[in-house]
Amino acid sequence: PSMLYKSQGATVSKESRAIVLVLALAELLSRSGERIAWPGLTDPFTARNGAERLAAQLAHAAGLPARPDLTPMRRFSDIVIASDFLDPVEETMAWLEPLAQRGVRAHLVEVCDPAEETFPYVGRTEFRDPETGEKLTAGRAEMLGDDYRRLYAARRDELASWCGRLGWSYTVSRTDRLASETLIKVHMTMTADAGRGRGR
């Protein structure tokens, strides 16, 4: 599965939702005087038009890695990572664990399409990766449903529990729901955290 995926039940692709969420958070944070950055694209900066500057940088960026280098992140910083987190859980944890060791607080936002949660497919179904074009045909897709939903939920539960143990936040953003719901939740989590004495 990829971030370009968009089922009939969704209003936007996962990638579009992720970008909107991150830029909206950047706007809120920069307007309140926080320093913001996009790892691997910009150094931290303070500007009232922070989201606009990030958007301009993104528009001219080519080939940004799916997993940027996070080693420049410093203690007491917060990072928001919006992804579908469909890679093996162990790989995601190995990538992010060094952040916890350095005292960085992460806010993971799992962007998901409603069809990925419910697996509404029946009968002969062809699944195609929108990035690679790779295809998989299932003769009776409904036979895969129960196992798929169980594995999908277990992955999410494991990541969310891991984040909880680290003092991080984990938020799910479905692409058939309003982006503002996620935005408010993540921003409130970050703001409440800053109120307890953490800086960004």
Image (tube, helix red, strand yellow):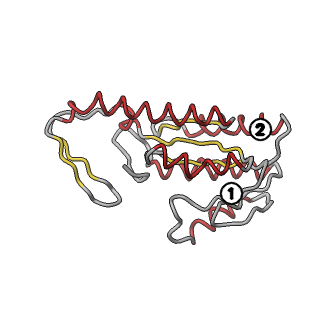
- Which amino acid is tagged 2? Thr
What residue would you read off at disc 2? 191
Vertical position of residue 35 compared to residue 126: above or below = below
Q: CA distance from mark 1 to mark 2?
A: 18 Å
- 124 and 181: which one is in front? 124
Q: Residue at x 38, y 47 (%)?
A: 6
Residue 42 placement, left or right of 158? right
Q: Residue at x 49, y 49 (%)?
A: 91
Is 65 or 99 nearer to us in this picture? 99
Q: Position of residue 50 (x, y in %)?
A: 73, 59
* Front of the two marks 1 and 2: 2
Q: Position of residue 88 (x, y in %)?
A: 43, 46
Q: Is residue 7 above or below residue 50?
A: above
Q: In terms of image quadrants, where is residue 143?
A: top left
Check disc 2: other Cα within 10 Å, few if <14, some if 14-19, many if 20+. Answer: some
SS class of the residue under badge 1? Answer: helix
| Disc 2 element | helix
**Furthest residue to the right?**
197
Q: Is residue 146 left or right of residue 173?
A: left
Mark 1 closeness class: few <14, some 14–19, many ≥20 residues within 10 Å = many
Residue 51, numbered label: 1
Q: Which image quadrant is residue 191 in? A: top right
Q: Position of residue 68 (x, y in %)?
A: 58, 61
